[in-house]
Image (tube, helix red, strand yellow):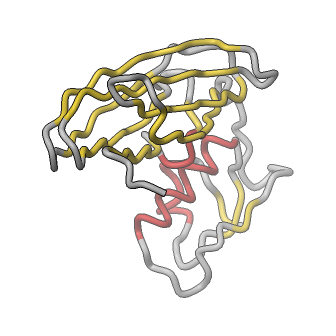
Amino acid sequence: LERSPAGMCVENAIYGNLFLPDEQPGFKVTAEALVAGRYAVDWQVTDVRGKPCETAHDALDLKAGERRAFGRTFARGRPGWYGVTATLRDAKGAALVTHRASYVLLAPGERKAGWDSPWFVWTGLGMHSRNGQAFTNAMELCRRGGIRHGHMGVFGEKEGAPWGMTLS
């Protein structure tokens, strides 16, 4: 094994990679060079059947030790699941790192039910968690999934109201 001259980290642009109709799908990327050079990140997006939908190319000239963060967005397609492959390449085109991910383009949210909702979720927040970020993440996933009724740990309906959540 030999050490790669560069590496990259691909992160979600939003928690859960579930994009609403008014949001642009994409990812956050950090590339870092151990060795100075020209690098590129090649992207391929495929639909649920593996059919290519979109490609993109991000060229990077990096100095040794340089770290660069950037974003990559993709066109909005039909609602559904999309696979993404990001490959960091050297100047000769050799693959150094490949990262596979996915995202979902959601249809417009039309669910308005609360107490009368047949959908319920156990958020996993537990009775003792007061972690505001964990609560926000859980509520955002519920909203994106059309879930409006659930267990919110130590948080109440007042805190869940911005996401349309009611207590179980």
Compared with residue 68, is residue 127 higher up or lower down, i.e. above or below? below
Quarter of the image where one finds residue 167:
bottom right
- Nearest the viewer among 93 and 146 is 93
> Which residue extends farthest bottom?
128
Quarter of the image where one finds residue 70:
top left
Q: Residue 23: image x %, image y %?
A: 47, 25
Which residue shows up at 47% across the image and 58% down it? 136
> Which residue extends farthest front?
1
Q: Residue 134: image x %, image y %?
A: 48, 66
Compared with residue 96, is residue 107 higher up or lower down, i.e. above or below? above
Residue 62 appears left or right of 27: left
- Nearest the viewer among 155 and 115 is 155
Which residue shows up at 45% across the image and 39% down it? 96
Residue 124 appears left or right of 95: right
Quadrant (top left, top right, bottom left, bottom right) of the C terminus? bottom right
Residue 157 appears left or right of 38: right
Q: Residue 109: image x %, image y %?
A: 66, 30
Q: Residue 69: image x %, image y %?
A: 25, 39
Quarter of the image where one finds residue 51:
top right
- Nearest the viewer among 35 and 1 is 1
